[in-house]
Image (cartoon, grey):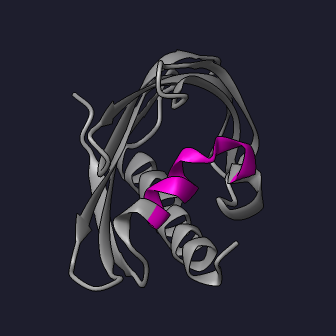
Amino acid sequence: MAEHTSSSITIEAAPADVMAVIADFARYPEWTGEVKEAEVLATDGQGRAEQVRLLLDAGAIKDDHTLAYTWTGADEVSWTLVKSQMLRVLDGSYKLAGLGGSRTEVTYQLTVDVKIPMLGMIKRKAEKVIIDRALAGLKKRVESGK
């Protein structure tokens, strides 16, 4: 059974501004670190990504995979793995909570499982690295105003 890892960060911006950066998949290679390429394959009626192909290089985990995205209101997006070369599971979510003014708490949850045997502690370490880098990159990107 796959376990998940989660972490939170506070960003000095309104939730809508944070979600705008999260939803802009074409720019992920500019700020995520692990995502080298991102291509939106399908969108919903509101123009939000429903399926995205990502080329990931996260050290121990390198993969070309497709994720299906589900948008819940304006403050949450989750994803699940559609297909992958190396991964069995890559499920996660961003949940945003406005803290008043122009501050947002972002919680990132991630579950990773690979097709090849790997120690659980190595998988958790990879999840933690992905989450920490993604949250730090998101914070920097949003607060820089790019």
Q: Could you say where residue 80 lies in the image, as x and y percent from the top left?
A: 40, 25
Above or below, comparing residue 44 to residue 78 in the picture: above
Asked if residue 143 lies left or right of residue 98, the reply is right
Report the front residue among 14 and 142: 14
* Residue drawn at 22 percent across, 65 percent down: 97
* Residue drawn at 21 percent across, 27 percent down: 1
Q: Could you say where residue 55 lies in the image, as x and y percent from the top left?
A: 73, 35
Task: Quadrant for residue 92, please give it.
Answer: top left
* Residue drawn at 24 percent across, 41 percent down: 3
Asked if residue 14 lies left or right of residue 33, the reply is left
Task: Quadrant for residue 53, please give it.
Answer: top right
Above or below, comparing residue 15 to residue 140 in the picture: above
Report the front residue among 89 and 74: 74
Asked if residue 112 lies left or right of residue 1, the reply is right
Quadrant where the C terminus is found in the figure: bottom right
Residue range in magenta is 17-27
Report the front residue among 114 and 110: 110
* Residue drawn at 35 percent across, 83 percent down: 102
Q: Is residue 21 magenta?
A: yes
Q: Is residue 135 magenta?
A: no
How many numbered badges does the structure rendering display?
0
Above or below, comparing residue 123 to residue 117 in the picture: below
Q: Main secondary structure of the magenta part?
A: helix
Above or below, comparing residue 10 to residue 70 in the picture: below
Q: Could you say where residue 21 lies in the image, as x and y percent from the top left?
A: 56, 58
Q: Could you say where residue 116 lies in the image, as x and y percent from the top left?
A: 53, 24
